Image (cartoon, grey):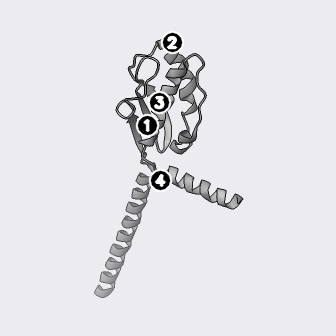
Amino acid sequence: MRKTLIIAAIMLLVAGTASLDARTKKSAKSRKATASTTQVIYTGDIAKKVIGYNGTTPLNIKVKNGVIEDIEVLQNQESPSYLKRATQKVLPQYIGKTVAEAKKLKPDIATGATYTSEALIKNIQMGLDQAKSTPSSKKKAATTKKAAKKRR
């Protein structure tokens, strides 16, 4: 009788430990899946020589999980009306694109604000060169390569 109780207690202990281990692993996986990678790239230092019409046009580029979420124009010497025209034309072309897609993009330039538009584009390109690649963007690139091989 005593032996049976000891065996039953050991079995319960083992079952409880296995259940706890499974819940811990599941919890760790869900935390990993929901964790997001966000980086903000400041172009003021890396694009010092990129000049618009009246000077440099530094940006903060927010990249979340490999996708461009926002581009913020920082303090600069550009004419507000030309800067507004350029930002309304250029920046929306990048928002929502992956870093890889954005690097390949040939954006339209705002008419009448060519120098400012070109400076914004060059700042974005230089900033995206600094972006860290994420597993999701690498996975997408690998999928694209496989699809290209199949088409051949």
Residue position marked by numbered label 4 in the rendering: 135
Amino acid of disc 4 = Pro
Counting other residues with Cα less than 10 Å from the Cα at mark 3, is it few (<14), some (14-19), or many (20 or more)? some
In-front residue for pair 20/104:
104
**Is label 2 in a helix, a strand or a loop?**
helix
Q: Which residue is mark 2?
A: 81
Estimate how packed mark 1 is, as few (under 14), some (14 to 19) or many (20 or more) residues with alpha carbons within 10 Å: many
Q: Is residue 55 left or right of residue 112?
A: left
According to the image, label 1 marks what residue? 127
Kindly identify the residue that appears in the image at 31 percent across and 82 percent down.
5
Mark sitting on residue 147: none
Q: CA distance from mark 2 to mark 1?
A: 24 Å
* Within-10-Å neighbours for mark 4: few <14, some 14–19, many 20+: few
Contact between labelled residues 4 and 3, with CB atoms less than 8 Å apart: no
Quadrant holding the C terminus: bottom right
Q: Earlier in the sequence, mark 2 or mark 4?
A: 2
